[in-house]
Structure formats: C-alpha cells, structure tokens
Amino acid sequence: FGEFEFVEEGAQLDDRGGVAEDVPVVAVVGRPNVGKSTLVNRILGRRAAVVEDVPGVTRDRVAYDAEWRGRRFTLVDTGGWDPDAKGFMARVAAQAELAVAAADVVVFVLDVTVGATDIDEAVVRILRRAGKPVIVAANKADDVRGEADAAALWNLGLGEPHPVSALHGRGSGDLLDAIFAVLPEAPRRREPAEGGPHRVALVGKPNVGKSSLLNRLAGEERVVVDAVAGTTVDPVDELVELGGKVWRFIDTAGIRRRVREASGHEYYASLRTAAAIDRAEVVVVLLDAAQPLSEQDLRIISNVVEAGRGLVLAFNKWDLVDEERRLRLEKELDRQLRIRWAPRVNLSALTGWHVDRLVRAIETSLEGWSTRVPTAELNAFLGRLVAAHPHPVRGGKQPRILFGTQPQTSPPKIVLFTTGYLEPVYRRFLERRLREEFGFAGSPIQISMRIRQ
Ligand code: GDP
Ligand code: GDP
C-alpha cells in the first residue's frame, strides 16, 4: 500500500511552506518600552489579550489575526528584550533576525522622545541586510512636536519615518496604509461555497453499493429542482433531501451509468472518481464491509485526504457481516487504515439499516472541514504544548515552533514558523493534539512549516 504511507503520516507537510503566502506576516520589532504592545493593540483595534502571560511561556512572540481595508494579515508581536540579560546584544540581533526571516513586512518601532539608540542602530543594520520591506514607526509622537522629532529618524536610512501615537491613535491609519502598501499581493483565495446545497460525493470501488445507496437516499420521490430557490443543477448531479436539508450529490450520473456499463472502464471510472472528489466538499467513501479492505479502497481514501476534502467512511453490506467478520474488519482497519479522525457509519443500502446516520456523519465532517482556530488561541495552545513537550534535541539543535497561524479553512491549513525541521513523529503528535484541542473531526489537516533560514 505504497500511497498509504502518506495518509499514515497524517499531516501533509509542505516544507517549502508554500501555503503560508495566503496570509502575509507583519512583524513588529523594537527595543523594550518603545510601545510595541500598545501599537499591536492599536492595530488590532481592541484591548487584545496581548499581555496574556502564560507562566513559563514568554510573550516572546505572539501572533494575531489582523485586518486593514479588507486585507487579512498575521501580526506578530516580537515582544521585548530584557536589556539586563546576559548577551543582550546577541538576543536583540537574534530577535530581529528571526522577525525578518519569518515576516513579509517588518514594522520597526522607535520612541521619538528618546530617538535612535545604539541598540536601534544595531537593529537597523540587520534590517538593512534583510532586504524585506521595513516600515519605520516613530512612536510616541503624541503631538506636533513629536511629529517634528520623528523626522530625525530619516537618518536611519530606512525610508520615511511614520509618526504615530500608539497610545492615542494619532497617525495609526497612515501607518497602516504604509503597511498595506507593501503587503505582498495575496494570491486569489478560493471561492467560498456558493451558498447553495453542500456538495457531497459518493465514491467507492465498483459493486460496493453506490447506486443502491443513492437510490435509498434519494427515495422514490426525487427532489424537484425548482423547489430549491436559485439552484442550477448540473444534470449529472442530484439534489437529495436528508435530515431536513438539501444536499447536492455530485456526478450521480456516473454512479447510475456504471451499473449499465460493462467492466473494463476502470480508468474512466477512476477519472470520474477523482473529478467528483475534486468538486465535493465532503466525500463519502463507501466500503464493502463483507470484503477485506482492498488497495483500491485505500487509494480512494488517500485521494480524498490528498485533495483535502471532508471524509466519511461508510461500511456497506453490514447485513452480511457476522461477528467473526466484524472482528476481522476491526483488525484490518487497525493495521491498514490509521485514520482515526473520520466519522464512520456501518450501514446496509439493501435493508436501509443505519442509512439515516449518514447525514449526521456528513455534517460532522463538514463542520471539522470548516473549523477556523483564531491565531491567538492557536498560539496560546502551541505555547502550552511546546512548553510541556518540546521537540527533542537533534544534533545539538532543538527546532522550536515560534508561532503558528491558520491561513485558511476548507480544508484547515496550519502554518508553523519554526527554527528547524520538525520530525514526522513530532508532527503527528502535534496533529493529534490539535485535533484533541480544536476538533477538526472528519477533516484532513494540512500542516506546513516555514523554516527560518
Ligand atoms: P513594548 O515594551 O515595546 O511592548 O512597549 P509597551 O507597549 O509596553 O509600552 C511601553 C510604555 O510606553 C507604556 O507605558 C505605554 O503606555 C507607553 N506608550 C506606548 N505608546 C505610547 C505613545 O504613543 N505615547 C506615549 N506617550 N506613551 C506610549
Ligand atoms: P455500485 O457498483 O457501487 O453502484 O454497486 P451497486 O449499488 O450496483 O451494488 C452492487 C451489488 O451489491 C448489487 O447486487 C446490490 O444489490 C448489492 N448490494 C448493495 N448494497 C448492499 C447491501 O447493503 N447488502 C447486500 N447484501 N448487498 C448489497
């Protein structure tokens, strides 16, 4: 089961971190007391839980969801440095370098009432080398005089200083506009579900009972298309009412036709399956409970996970399952199918037994599939988790998770900013804990790392 290894891994990691580009990262850097936290609060537009001191976890780096003029971005408060700490300059440099490595835009905060200090100058050198857009926030410019002092910061050579008073709000709109102007172009986001009935694909190998189940679900009376306002239905789709809701079953013509087709159309059947999975939000994979789990079954499941769709496992022909077969099936599942997160329904399309449970399973998957974890919550969780279970040291180095965001749902994608490569075992552990904490039942989670260079 070559492909299956992949599913077993659980999290699908894109080590190049391609997905992270969905939501740009803006890091706020600066020495202690220049007003970084105040500015972060100002940008978030609320008294956020910025000073959410979790014991044992520094507020070293805290990430939040932010938005300005309809653009979402992740705002990272890089926290303060303790000027009395040993190796302070090294820490400052490390912090700034880190922010630069992880961020798309750096907001460098200075205090105009103090001006640029030696530490600020050290940070400037790092920022200049990095070649990322830097916005100079000349903070504590509470009045006209402060604005004049801000002009002195032109000397830093980082471009125009933006006078701002994080405390009173003065200039913060202009600062945000300056940030907005250098945010990288966001790639086109996937269209949200068009508001119509949710799209469900019913797939499975030939003779597993797809058309029997579809007939069972659709019943004798077909849903009248006109009855559902504003829906245009692809002639290959079928609207089915289940649990008081209308669902769009995808490519049912393919299912119905298959019954009449002679065998030998494997290739086309698998293309149809792939296309149906692609169009669906949730996929019900139908399995024959009376037969051993086959490579084809596992491949289909694997395709659903790879496509990032909600998954329901439906074991059909349960009327043929006796106690012996049931026990053997559980063993097969245990050994070959390591997916623990997909809702499972045992049913019989022939007798109609438990068919009514399918809708609840579909709803569960849909819910997990569209779960969004707010960035602050995700990071509070990661902070606790990493403090209790740090990544093992490898070759004298310990990869750390700096922060994470969930730039998108449907399927949930989580981007972790790390100082090194996270081992598969640790990634699986993370995925398990993420599921325990936030649900995601019935949905694959795509986790990618952005490793600091
Ligand atoms: P951080 O250590 O850089 O995060 O700085 P804080 O946000 O904790 O702010 C340090 C101090 O500066 C606090 O007492 C703030 O109230 C104050 N402060 C922050 N922004 C301003 C500002 O725009 N004007 C003035 N006058 N004080 C500010
Ligand atoms: P499809 O190729 O996946 O669409 O499968 P069909 O719906 O055509 O079913 C294939 C065969 O399995 C038919 O002979 C069905 O009567 C039979 N079948 C379907 N569901 C069940 C079930 O729940 N129990 C039993 N015993 N047979 C079933």
Image (cartoon, helix red, strand yellow):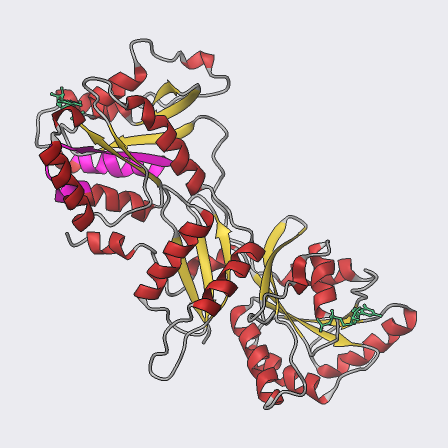
Tell me residue 290's x, y (percent).
12, 32
Q: Is residue 74 magenta?
A: no
Q: Is residue 404 left or right of residue 289?
A: right
Q: Quadrant of residue 66?
A: bottom right
Residue drawn at 39 percent across, 21 percent down: 233
Tell me residue 263's x, y (percent).
8, 29
Q: Is residue 415 visible?
A: yes
Tell me residue 424's x, y (percent).
31, 64
Residue drawn at 36 percent across, 27 percent down: 359
Q: Is residue 294 magenta?
A: yes
Q: Is residue 18 left or right of residue 357?
A: right
Q: Which residues are magenta?
A: 268-297
Q: Is residue 85 left or right of residue 356?
A: right
Ligand 1: quadrant of the figure? bottom right
Q: Hey, which residue is sitting farthest top in the picture?
A: 221
Image vertical order of residue 409 relative to residue 248, above or below:
below
Image vertical order of residue 291 relative to residue 379, above or below:
above
Residue drawn at 35 percent across, 30 percent down: 200
Q: Is residue 177 visible?
A: no
Q: Is residue 401 left or right of residue 216?
A: right
Q: Quadrant of residue 153?
A: bottom right
Residue drawn at 22 percent across, 38 percent down: 271
